[in-house]
Image (spheres, rainbow, N blue to C red):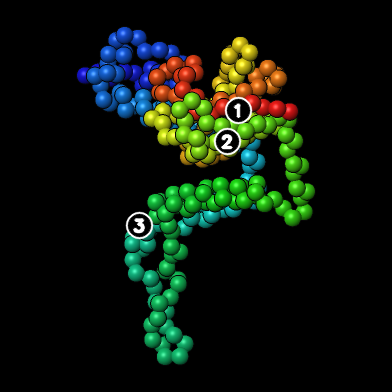
Amino acid sequence: MQHLDRDRLVFLALGESEADDGEARHLDACAHCRAEVDGLRHVAGLGAGTQGLGDLPDPPEHVWQGIVAEVAAAEALPSLGDRRAAGPPATAPTPETGAARPGRAGGRRRRLPRWAVTAVTAAAAAAVGVVGTFAVLSGSADEPRPPERVVLASGSLTAYGTTPRDASGDARVFTDNQLHLHVANLPAVPGYYEVWLIDPATMRMFSVGVLNAGTGDALLPLPPNVDLRTYSVVDVSAEQYDNKPAHSGDSLLRGTLTG
């Protein structure tokens, strides 16, 4: 069986286009292509859930310089094959007895094998992430603490429809057009959670972003021209991986923003 083109699977997973009749029949019959689409959708959901992490600062320059120095030192050391080809290390007589002892004249400095150099590089890259995150969280003792964010509007989210009553949440909109959500006890769903702003007078709505199921907090960017007096209702819905961008109609939490 000939599988669907990889690029086409990406478009279908991202919801950029609908599957035609032939593609839909193929996906029904082909477990391999279905698994590819499901995996791509999962990755897309994870990426959407990390939008708020895009503004983290770069690690300090000395961290990168340390990584370059470590890798360069590892590359400059002689390899294990070089040491084997050179034979056993030369010996030199001791000044006390004239007996031979291992010497350094014919020896070579150890060189890390290629896999070890790769491991050093990977470990150093991981250290960059740790140091960068620590710098963001703690900062320098000489640097002033960043100003507190100003809340423009806020509201409580409560269970909607048949959602269990213990599900709840809070929504805050900051003056920098960021929507912060904290939710708890959402029921498990086979798809994913999506966040919407709704005009209660007309029920017009637009999607703000995807809520990561692995955490109770999300920071989502809002359009700079959004009118919160009109789009005042925050809605968290359960969505399916069905390539349909519209609201599913299955709302789990709702609440009204007030300024």
Q: For mark 2, does the 10 Å Cα neighbourhood hold few (<14), some (14 to 19), or many (20 or more) residues?
A: many
- SS for dot 1: strand
Asked if the residues shown at circle 2 and circle 1 are in contact, with their CB atoms under 8 angstroms apart, the answer is yes
Residue at image coords 40%, 81%: 101
**Looking at this rendering, what residue extends furthest in the bottom direction?**
97
- SS for dot 3: helix
Q: For mark 3, does the 10 Å Cα neighbourhood hold few (<14), some (14 to 19), or many (20 or more) residues?
A: few
Question: At which x and y percent is residue 220?
Answer: 60, 30
Of pointers 1 and 3, the one earlier in the residue sequence: 3
Identify which residue, 250 or 115, lies in the foreground.
250
- The residue where tag 1 is placed is 255
Q: Is residue 207 above or below residue 84?
A: above
Asked if the residues shown at circle 2 and circle 3 are in contact, with their CB atoms under 8 angstroms apart, the answer is no
- The residue where tag 3 is placed is 81
Question: At which x and y percent is residue 162?
Answer: 45, 28
- The residue where tag 2 is placed is 169
Eye-nearest disc, 2 or 3: 2
Q: Is residue 218 in sight in this rendering?
A: no
Question: At which x and y percent is residue 136?
Answer: 65, 46
* Left or right of 179, for residue 126: left
Q: Is residue 178 above or below residue 147?
A: above
**Looking at this rendering, what residue extends furthest in the left direction?**
1
Residue at image coords 39%, 73%: 90
User: Quick one: quadrant of the N terminus?
Assistant: top left
